[in-house]
Image (cartoon, rainbow, N blue to C red):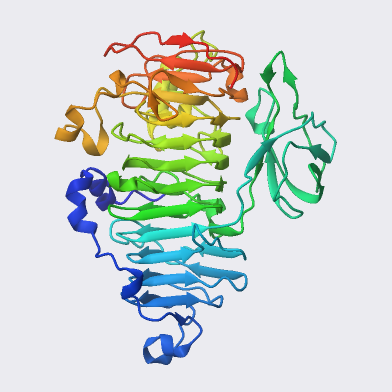
Amino acid sequence: MRKANRSVELYSLIPAFLLASVFAVPAQSAESLAKPTNWSNPATWPGRKVPAAGAKVEIPAGKEVILDVSPPALGGITVMGKLTFADKSDLTLATEWMMVHGELEVGTEAKPFTHKATITLTDNVKDEQMMGMGDRGIMLSGGTLNLHGTRTNTWTKLAKTAEAGSNVIEVLNADQWKAGDEIVLASTDFNPRQAERRTIAAISGNTITLDRKLDYMHFGKITFGVDERGEVGLLTRNIKIQASEDAAQTYFGGHIMAMVTSKMFVDGVELERMGQHMELARYPIHWHLVGDGGKGQYIRNASIHDTYNRCVTVHGTHNVRVENNVTYNIVGHCFFLEDGIEHGNEFVRNLAIQIKCHPTKPCVPTNLAANGEITENRQALRQASFSGKDTLLPSDNTVTAYWITNPDNSFIDNVAAGSDETGFWFSLPMHPQGAFEGSDASKNIWPRRRAARVQGQRGPFQFRRVHDRSAHQRGQHLRFGLNSDAAVGESQRSGEQTAGVALRESDQLQEPQWRSVGPG
């Protein structure tokens, strides 16, 4: 695997307010743009030559180009002005990378894109470094990303048990789903790898005929007042961002990164083969040191699957909304709050299925089960997990669907339906760390003493539904750690009932208090 770029590591250690002057690009209003011209029009381009295969394209400031055709594979695109996809036909765009200082638009919140749009990030030219943000990405430096597709019904539950050997399932709500769509059924067994991906062959109301029979049973009942119906997630979207197929062998996928003063509005988008394994700051969706500028930004109704380095990373960024997303077959902590300074972010009704420590290798837990369920040499396992050979962080060897470093964020109605290790993990530092360690901003922030948010209000932290079937293997839905990376203590709980959690205001490791709040 490639080594993380040193300049990126440097940027990651500089607080947001110091980076603002480095990455700020003057904003341009719609009024400042010249009349849009089509990509296919020779008059749009210097020398009246439409970009050929391998070309590095620049759209200058003040200019809007409408992508009305599918161009040949390009060597890179720099957007100083605006690049807009025309919503008149299906479009494909292949490029090594995209650097956005202006705006990339595929649909808007008011007018979603209705055709199919596919952006494929290639890697024919190795180890390019774009302003410290690496390679094979959509990289925003003061720019705006507007991606808005049509799908909003992203996941549902089984209406009844789906038996092994059956190719027909019934769900609670299949609105917007259609033949040809890919879906994933969460495991309802102790083994999280019993999640199954299938294509819809036919659909009638909420009855779905699959292209292949199921290998496993998927439970679909409410028992003793506990909702144990398996989740079914929709993977297909009409806007798709992906790395080319070679990423499945190299684990060097694409990434989307928003730097200081950048803005991301992502809705109804599919992300596949994204994230760069063992690379810092190379994640499928990544807000990087955006600070208070995160307010109003979001990723929602998205499908993030077959990734090699996390799902959604919120780093040094506040008040973004992560809502109604489906994730499947993910390597590393999936929904990730990085340094413990992040606050006011909202994680609402997300579904995480099959979270793995490594693309192919098993987990080597940093925190072994309390009753010694792992029989191998404990010290040797712990040492191996800290070697960094196979995971980005040591704690990724005890991978979790939701990695939470500051309780001053909202987590509402989220589901962890299949993690190799843990569903929800609190890893609470004394003060923010990483890029903010020792800074003035961090001195007055105490994640361990912070009251958690309940639906945006302060108070006991509430999981409306604690649901991590795979964690039943170790009896572990929730893990609590007061170290910066690897937790030194844990809390275990079995069953699928709802739990409310309040942390005592103490700097010492203590057993968390539990308070039942009833079924969610």
Q: Position of residue 63 (x, y in %)?
A: 36, 77
Q: Is residue 125 above or below residue 153?
A: below
In front here: 503 or 214? 503
Dividing the picture into quarters, in which one does residue 485 lie? top left
Image x and y of residue 145, in percent: 41, 59
Q: Which residue is drawn at 31% across and 53% down?
A: 259
Residue 310 in view of the camera: no
Is residue 228 rendered to the left or right of residue 441? right
- On the question of residue 37 being in view, the answer is yes
Q: Is residue 132 left or right of residue 353?
A: left
Picture residue at 32% right of the left edge, 68% below the top? 29
Please state the total of marks drawn on the protein image.
Answer: 0
User: Whole-percent x and y of residue 134?
Assistant: 35, 57
Q: Residue visible at 69% across and 51% down?
A: 176
Coordinates of residue 235 in the picture (x, y in percent): 63, 48
Furthest-left residue in this view: 440
Q: In which quarter of the image is the C terminus?
A: top right
User: Image height check: is 364 above or below 311?
Assistant: above
Q: Which residue sits at x=32%, y=55%?
A: 262
